[in-house]
Image (spheres, rainbow, N blue to C red):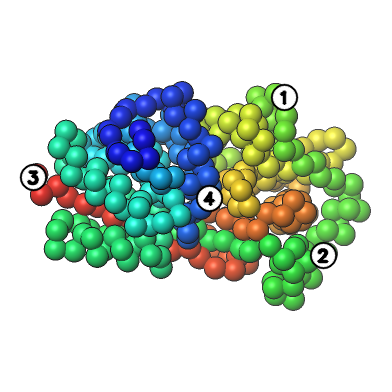
Amino acid sequence: MTSSHISLCTVTPKAFKEQIECFDQAVLETPDIATFCSGSDWILTAHETLHPPRPMHAWCRDGHWLLASMGELPPFARVLQPLEMTWAFGCPLSGPDPSISLQILFDVIREPHLFWQVIMLTGIPENSTLWSELQQRLEGRYAYEVFEGADCIQSHINEGADAFLSCRSSKFRANLRRSERQADQHGITYELITDFSDPDTLFQRMMQVEQSSWKFASGRSIFLIGRYRAFYEKLLHRLTANGRLRLLFAQQDGQDVAYVFGGVLGSVYRGFQLSYDNNFAAYSLGHLVQWQMIQQLAQESVELYDLGMVMDYKKRWADHTLKLLNVVIFSPHF
């Protein structure tokens, strides 16, 4: 790949590793997208654990990227699709100028040696220049369909933890302060982990808490599904290795009783999973580890907290929703 010419190439995660920093920088410079879930940590881990083996392709021009894989997506046999298709948060187009990113896409679409039936784009921000320009370029040239994506609920913490808390309701603030006092009286302490030499130990600590949770007991824990457990375990390993891990435990008498697990990319934090020992449910530990994490992130100048998929319990922590679209483009030759 060069900056002046796009050529189709198949790369392995190992080969792509040499250019990961450049790719992630392009992601950080891309307006409006779900940043962390468009970055290398999330999409490569998903590619390696959540999907059947599929060739990975990358195109690059002037600091802009299209990263995708070719594989089956029933009923179609040859679909050029993002590396992560389970939740489809990430955008496969990255770089500061949407016009250049889209030129890469349309050069690839017209690539004579690339046989494709469908191109799938995910994580396209609904209110963005990228989407408006994509529509203009597709209209009248290619058949396409648009579907609602997996929106992300987010909160700005760039003005600090106290400013964040001041935007919550008075009832929310009072309940949180009450829970803090109660937890302190019962000896609850917190341990933030950003680097650790033994990620397997960290994962086991998380799983011990998880197995004591109401989610696990009711069969609703995501870790009960093998491929998701493999995804988060490998993601934790990757984040530990590159210093992007953010993991916080609540403890009582040296025993882990709750955790919140996430990662950072640039000034964006993405939360993944949170759980607590159901024997300590009266302490509101889910809220407390979330609040402790926000305070820690604000101290290190993280600006945006991405809570992930929209759920009712998350709304009290959030300021806005990032609306995302999925776009399916059909080959004119199929």
| Residue position for label 4 | 28
Q: CB of mark 4 within 8 Å of CB of mark 3?
A: no
> Which residue type carries mark 2?
Arg
The N terminus lies in quadrant:
top left
Nearer-N-terminus badge (1/3): 1
Mark 1–mark 4 Cα distance, whole angstroms, equals: 27 Å
- Give the answer, above or below, for where 202 lies relative to 283: above
- Percent position of residue 64, x then y: 41, 46
Sort mark 2 into few (<14), some (14-19) or many (20+) by Cα contacts within 10 Å.
few
Q: What is the residue that sits farthest to the bottom in this orientation?
A: 170
Sort mark 1 into few (<14), some (14-19) or many (20+) by Cα contacts within 10 Å.
few
Q: What is the residue that sits farthest to the left in this orientation?
A: 333
| Residue position for label 2 | 177
Res. 239 in view: yes
Disc 4 vs disc 3: which is toward the camera? 4
Nearer-N-terminus badge (2/4): 4
Mark 1–mark 2 Cα distance, whole angstroms, equals: 34 Å
Q: CB of mark 1 within 8 Å of CB of mark 4?
A: no
| Residue position for label 3 | 333
> Which residue type carries mark 4?
Leu
Residue 197 circle label: 1
> Which residue type carries mark 1?
Ser
162 with respect to 312 (left or right): right
- Percent position of residue 212, x then y: 67, 38
Q: CB of mark 2 within 8 Å of CB of mark 4?
A: no
Name the secondary structure under disc 4. helix
Nearer-N-terminus badge (4/3): 4
Res. 213 in view: no
Sort mark 3 into few (<14), some (14-19) or many (20+) by Cα contacts within 10 Å.
few
Which image quarter: residue 287? bottom right
